């Protein structure tokens, strides 16, 4: 199924939850909505599912408007944040509950469909278990099986792993991606976890205050953020702002930053114009690079194969990630020289 949102807005009184959101999700795509709390992710999902009606705009499935179509008639499977399993039903009965509005696909009986799905989510033989006897990860997989039971054309996942610990979350997101890939079902996934969004998605939409800031592949969003918000929200970035002092004959500009000049190749801006650009922590290197600066070490974090350093550079905080060689050579309060190349710089709005 191809999903389209055409200038969808949602208002609650004077509060605007969604502001002219337009998105297109291809058939079989794993598409993720990511952003901070209150940015409109869940409201977008609820408008797609039919639990909310847009104030303006249109939701379309395969170019057909969903206006007035109730949730149960949309061919959508939904996995909620709290799983919403029925404690008085067995695991098998919970999965079969997903078939209350539709017959099992492929001419299977209900019992055959339940067994097929429990095997798919690695819970074969759990039909008679009580949901309360399962771990959080197992309950999440039962909820996924229930959503998949009628063979939906569209699967919606609303932060289904937010209550799980980090290690289990990482294992289950791989499993969800595998199942989605095997079935080829169009999937919209909601999360506030940027690393999760980057790991599982074919494409990502970054939302902020009810608006779409950027849509792109995980690599595009990470390496080429369109706005300062995306640069600061997705992963970690050093965002710097300076004024163009002169232009380079080779193309590019010289920017004044904290009483220091840095050369940025490939940047097109006029003298006197303010330029904001970002540098990933891993793109700052110790004592090397075209542009060199010196800062004071204010914090170190050992992270196994790498060490994360925070430097104070004339009142500006910089984060640097360096390979750890096993020797503790960086001391708090010491001065450190770091540098970067122009090719590592990305200009944002």
Image: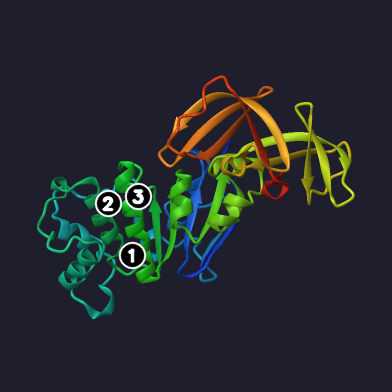
Q: Which residue is depicted at the point 18% across and 60% down?
A: 123
Residue, far top: 333
Q: Which callout, 1 or 2, points to the residue nearer the camera?
A: 1
Picture coordinates of residue 186, whole percent (x, y): 44, 66
| Residue identifier under label 1 | 179
Residue 126's image quarter?
A: bottom left
Tell me if 252 is positioned left or right of 103 in this view.
right
Element under label 2? helix
| Residue identifier under label 2 | 140
Tell me if 345 is positioned left or right of 140 in this view.
right
Residue 57's image quarter?
A: bottom right
Which mark sits nearer the N-terminus, 2 or 3? 2
Picture coordinates of residue 104, whole percent (x, y): 25, 73
Residue 100 visible in the current orientation: yes
* Residue 79 in the image: above or below residue 318: below
Count of numbered tags: 3
Label 1 close to label 2 by CB (< 8 Å): no
Residue, far left: 128
Element under label 1? helix
* Residue 237 in the image: above or below residue 190: above
Q: Residues within 10 Å of mark 1 (few under 14, many from 20)?
A: some
Picture coordinates of residue 147, whole percent (x, y): 31, 60
Q: Which residue is depicted at the point 53% across and 38% down?
A: 321
| Residue identifier under label 3 | 170
Which mark sits nearer the N-terminus, 3 or 1? 3
* Residue 179 in the image: above or below residue 338: below
């Amino acid at each position: 199924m191809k999903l389209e949102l055409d200038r969808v807005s949602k208002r609650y009184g004077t509060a605007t939850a969604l502001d002219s959101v337009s998105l297109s999700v291809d058939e079989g795509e794993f598409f993720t909505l990511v952003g901070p709390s209150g940015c409109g992710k869940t409201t977008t999902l609820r408008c797609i599912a039919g639990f909310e009606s847009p104030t303006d705009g249109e939701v379309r499935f395969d170019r057909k408007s969903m206006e007035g179509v109730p949730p149960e008639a949309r061919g959508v499977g939904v996995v909620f944040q709290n799983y919403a399993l029925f404690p008085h039903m067995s695991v098998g009965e919970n999965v079969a509950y997903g078939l209350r509005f539709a017959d099992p696909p492929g001419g299977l009986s209900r019992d055959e469909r339940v067994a097929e799905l429990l095997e798919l989510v690695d819970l074969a033989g759990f039909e008679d278990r009580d949901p309360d006897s399962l771990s959080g990860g197992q309950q999440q997989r039962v909820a996924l099986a229930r959503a998949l039971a009628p063979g939906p054309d569209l699967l919606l996942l609303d932060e289904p792993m937010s209550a799980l610990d980090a290690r289990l979350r990482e294992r289950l997101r791989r499993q969800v991606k595998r199942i989605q890939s095997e079935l080829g079902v169009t999937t919209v996934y909601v999360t506030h976890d940027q690393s999760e969004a980057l790991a599982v998605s074919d494409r990502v939409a970054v939302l902020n205050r009810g608006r779409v800031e950027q849509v792109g592949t995980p690599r595009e969003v990470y390496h080429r953020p369109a706005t300062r918000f995306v640069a600061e929200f997705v992963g970690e970035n050093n965002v710097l702002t300076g004024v163009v002092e002169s232009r380079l004959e080779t193309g590019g500009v010289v920017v004044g930053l904290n009483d220091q000049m840095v050369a940025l190749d490939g940047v097109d801006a006029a003298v006197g114009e303010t330029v904001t650009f970002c540098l990933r922590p891993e793109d700052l290197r110790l004592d090397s690079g075209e542009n060199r600066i010196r800062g004071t070490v204010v914090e170190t974090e050992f992270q196994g194969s790498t060490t994360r350093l925070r430097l104070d550079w004339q009142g500006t905080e910089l984060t640097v990630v360096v390979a750890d060689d096993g020797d503790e050579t960086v001391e708090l309060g010491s001065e450190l020289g770091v540098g970067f190349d122009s090719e590592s710089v990305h200009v944002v709005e």
